[in-house]
Image: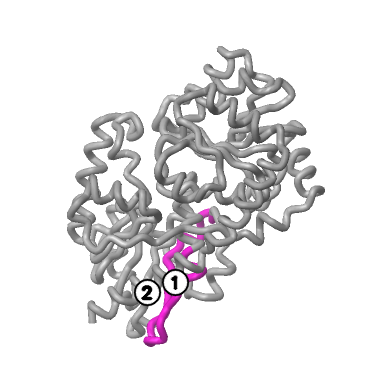
Amino acid sequence: MTGDRRSILIDGRVNGLPGAHGLARSLVGLAENLGLADDGMTVRVLVNPAREQLFPLAQLSKRAELVGTDITLGALHRFRALARLIGECGAAVLYVPYPLFRPLVCPCPVVVTIHDCTIESDGGFAGGWHRQLGMKVATRAVLSRAAAVTTPTKASFAELARFYPSAPNPVVIPNGVDTRRFAAVTASAAAAVRDHYRLPERFILTVGAHRPHKNHGVLVRAMLAVPPQVSLVIVGYPDPNFRNYLPGLIAGLGLQSRVRLVPSVGEEWLPALYRAASAFALPSLAEGYGLPALEAMAAGTPVVVSAIPVLEEVCSGAAVLVPAHDPAAWASALNLLLDGGPPVAGLVAHGAAVAAAATWERGGLALGELLASVARKGR
């Protein structure tokens, strides 16, 4: 690493943060496809190599120089050491994927991503008003010192304007999906994932951590009106910041034999898991993007989602839209998908086309242009 060579620096330490799969997937996908003008700058990515990486970095290492550090995201007491490291990297701009990850001191302009305003929209989603207030104050402080802010959808852009109208230079940088990983799954791979996780032959899948805004309870209640030979598989870890009500709800409805809680699934198994599912459901009350819906579409699985603006935007007519809080409507939509037939086949074909158009390259190119522009202005 040579400090006299100017660089675009990406803070990729989130890839070593347990439970941060959504943020890490977005960062790695965009960074692997970062588009840059030939202006003599290189791309460097900060990583914590001693920590288990959520997503492999082999592909990223072919395009960028990985800079290892033992300074973790929570080590605020080491802010001076982090500032020195950023300077040693020759950073002309630093990109951070979440506002609270911004260094306390940074010797170059910073571009930050706000994926959504879920916490700002509801105190219950934040884990209490005190956490909500703290997030708002911290985010405003970060934005006041940012060179630009990105957000992944037009819907999240509108939320950003609502809660942080003074956000500087807001830009939509979409996420994406690698359709090759999901479309190539074979029937034998789908059978293998069922065996590996001991899943039933027919199941509805949803993916997301156990947090209030994920709204998993509506799917559990909907299962009362879904044929008994069909199960529900909820993949996601229980967030310790919230009370996990799902086990009690499942037991209270007598659905212990039909609802499976799977804390995590290996990244190598995920495409086959989507393909093995009879239907995919995303009942979220708030999202920044809704990547699991696109991944399910890429795998050829029919999708039903909450009728909220961000999911309507991302799914582009390729998913059944359902009122988020209505278990009967969810059951009706799920039964429609489970019955199959020409309408569902058409929905799956449309989903494959929507997923194919949602490439990481489009977001990577846009992010690269933004970062290079900020770097040039800082000269």
In which image quadrant can residue 151 be found?
Answer: bottom left
Q: Is residue 48 magenta?
A: yes
343 in relation to 291, above or below: above
Viewer-closest of 91 and 280 = 280
Q: Position of residue 271 (x, y in %)?
A: 66, 50
Q: Is residue 236 magenta?
A: no
**Mark 1 Cα within 10 Å, few/some/many (few <14, many 20+)?**
some
The answer to whether residue 95 is left or right of residue 361 is left
Q: Are marks 1 and 2 in contact (CB under 8 Å)?
A: yes
Q: Quadrant of residue 332?
A: top right
Extent of the magenta region = 30-53
The quadrant of the picture occupied by the C terminus is bottom left
Element on which disc 2 rests: helix
**What residue sits right under mark 1 in the picture?**
365
Task: Determine the residue positioned at 29% across, 57% down.
Answer: 102
Residue 144 against residue 378 in the figure, above or below: above
Amino acid type indicated by mark 1: Leu
- What residue did someone put label 2 on? 369
Residue at screen point 22% across, 49% down? 164
Residue at the outermost front position = 342
